[in-house]
Image: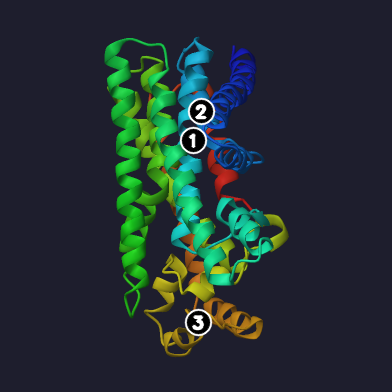
Amino acid sequence: METEHLLDERIGQKQVDRVLDGFFAAAKERAERISSSYLSLWETLEKSTIGGKRLRPQIVLAAYTQLGGTDLEAAARVGAAFELLHTALIVHDDVIDLDFVRRGQDNVSGVYRRMAETAGEPAEVARHRGLSVGIIAGDLALTGAFRMLDSVTTDPGTRELLAGILDEAVFASAGGELIDVDFSFSPGAPPVTEILDMERLKTAVYSFEAPLRAGAVLAGAGADAVAALGRFGRDTGIAYQVVDDLLGVFGNESATGKSSMGDLREGKRTVLIAYAAQTPCWAELSGLIGRPDMRPGDADRAREILVDCGAQDYAQDLAAQYASSARSHLASSDVPAGLAAALDDIVSSSVNRGR
């Protein structure tokens, strides 16, 4: 029976790709009737979705199939909605962070900045163009997520519950993003607990909690099962983000596709920085990070300080604690053994990235 569920999930993942292909094909056809440049934007947005792990659709499908769901087309559409939401949020996040590269390649804003530069525009004009198009593209992906969810064939009650889950994911993520932006203007560093609250809102809700709950609701699971999966998703998502903080400073750039100087140069308030701010090491560290002109040698010294003051070990231990807490929720009698095994694998892959 578990083998059948795994087969269903693989088939469902292929259906997610087909659903997304259909979504972008229809959008490009509409865009072409408006202008060739609008078509190009949709083509660029579509390319930005290629190469990802489809983590959120996988989570939807795991919950749905292991809880007895059989309508893979409906589940694929719910999964695709969360993939479009993810696309929207990372496109907008890159705009907020003034990033023009993702996974080692130009992101949407980067593509349009480069196009403007190639056309001979001044650097600031090209930068503005890239960021502007990033906002537009993120908006399109965000509205697409809600349109995709509305296309799911299900009963009115379930549709209303699913819409509420997606809305809460957007609402929480926006709140978390705002808190993160506010942190960047603070002279010091907030307590670790506040960093974790922000990371839950910004990432854990839409990446883990909401997809799990949506898959369970679509399958017709009871309230206790939905709640247990939500708690699992919360703790897994926090563990995932703490590991992301570690990779943003200590990760291998070729493996992560992300600069290992970006977070330090930005002075991003992470668990690492929040912990270090409570130690005597902060006096030196605070003078190194958050500088646009940070040199590689400064970044190396900042990493040494984060190791010496215990911040790296603290973050690693914290991620392990949240992973353990997540696994404890899988012991609920409302979570089938097959689903517990699948979700245990997701915890492992979330905390062992980059190793």
Q: Amino acid at mark 3?
A: Arg
Q: Which mark is residue 101?
A: none
Q: Residues within 10 Å of mark 2 (few under 14, many from 20)?
A: many
Q: In the shown orientation, is residue 6 left or right of residue 238?
A: right
Q: Could you say where residue 302 lies in the image, as x and y percent from the top left?
A: 56, 81
On screen, 31 above or below 160?
below
Q: Give whichever of 298, 321 is nearer the camera.
A: 298
Q: Which mark is residue 291?
A: 3
Q: In the shown orientation, is residue 153 left or right of residue 62?
A: left
Q: Are marks 2 and 1 in contact (CB under 8 Å)?
A: yes
User: Which is more N-terminal, label 2 or label 3?
Assistant: 2
On screen, 27 above or below 66?
below
Q: Are marks 3 and 1 in contact (CB under 8 Å)?
A: no
On screen, 194 above or below 311?
above
Q: Amino acid at mark 1?
A: Leu
Q: Could you say where residue 271 lies in the image, as x and y percent from the top left?
A: 43, 66
- Residue shown at the point (36%, 35%) measured from the top left: 230
On screen, 21 above or below 47?
above
Question: Pointer 1: what residue?
Answer: 84
Q: Could you say where residue 129 lies in the image, as x and y percent from the top left?
A: 52, 59
Residue pushed farthest right?
Answer: 254
For the N terminus, the quadrant is top right
Spatial distance from mark 3 to mark 1, Cα to Cα?
33 Å
- Residue shown at the point (47%, 58%) measured from the top left: 95
Q: Are marks 3 and 2 in contact (CB under 8 Å)?
A: no
Q: Which of the 4 image quarters holds residue 4?
A: top right
- Residue shown at the point (68%, 57%) measured from the top left: 104
Q: Which mark is residue 80?
A: 2
Q: Amino acid at mark 2?
A: Ala
User: From where the camera sits, is residue 43 visible?
Assistant: yes
